[in-house]
Amino acid sequence: MTENEHAAARLLTVREKIAAAAALAQREVEDITLIAVSKTHDADTILPLLNAGQRVFGENRVQETAAKWPALREELPDVQLHLVGSLQSNKAGDAVSLFDCIHSLDRPSLVKSLAGAMDKAGRRIPCFIQVDIGDEEQKGGCAIADLPALIEQARVADIPLAGLMCVPPAGIEPTPFFALLDKLAADHGLDGLSMGMSGDFETAVKLGATHVRVGTALFGARE
């Protein structure tokens, strides 16, 4: 098989699993966005997935995205880029110019930086608020207790809120964490749920995920 054929096969497998999980949950598969997480992968590795029809990609770093994506997007203007990694406040301007959605809004200082960058650029970028769903100090994310205030600050700043995002603790059954994120979103009138990665996206879909962030299952294990 060629690399294009391998990529198409991997993409089909992931899409079929998403569709099966959606059917079990009596959900429409069209309501679920597959984000191919292409961090650390170069353009030659990304092209086969683009050729297979994938158009939504996730990156972790502003600098890496700026280096490899502008040339790719020249040929395919319908590609959407999502920032799925943490964002430094001083990179807010670059993020607003590069990305179509941000999944890591997690603190008041970033609300201020992003609102200013959006004002300057004249465009509003949908943002997911990242929640520290497992209360892990080493991970990014807004503490659950601080979530109502951060949501209000984002709304006052006219930042479009796409929903909530989480990364459950590693090595633990993710179901309770996904269910909690779903409840938090419902409590605050938010529809979007960015949750689920290569190892648990089917569970996430069954529990309401609207966006799943899949890397390894599409690109293979990273070096």
Image: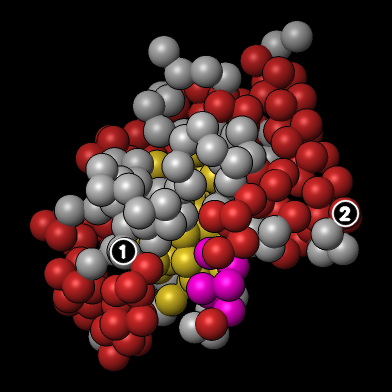
Q: Nearer the viewer, residue 120 or 151?
A: 151
Which residue is disc 2 drawn over? 24
Q: Secondary structure at mark 1?
A: loop
Magenta residue check for 124? no
Q: Tell me the amino acid under the disc marked 2.
A: Leu
**Image position of 76 (left or right of 54):** left
- Counting from the top left corner in percent of width and height, residue 69 is at 38, 40
- Residue 82 visible to the viewer: no
Picture residue at 60% right of the left edge, 41% below the top: 173
Q: Main secondary structure of the magenta part?
A: helix
Start and end of the magenta stretch?
181-186
Which image quadrant is residue 91 in?
A: bottom left
Q: Which mark is residue 142?
A: 1
- Residue 26 visible to the viewer: yes
Determine the residue located farthest toward the top in the rendered image: 1
- Counting from the top left corner in percent of width and height, residue 77 is at 51, 53
Picture residue at 71% right of the left edge, 26% below the top: 10
**Image position of 195 (left or right of 165):** right
Q: Are marks 2 and 1 in contact (CB under 8 Å)?
A: no
Mark 2 surroundings within 10 Å by alpha-carbon count, few (fewer than 14), some (14 through 19), many (20 or more): few
Seen in the picture, residue 29 relative to 109 is either above or below; the reply is: above
For marks 2 and 1, the one nearer the N-term is 2
Q: Secondary structure at mark 2?
A: helix
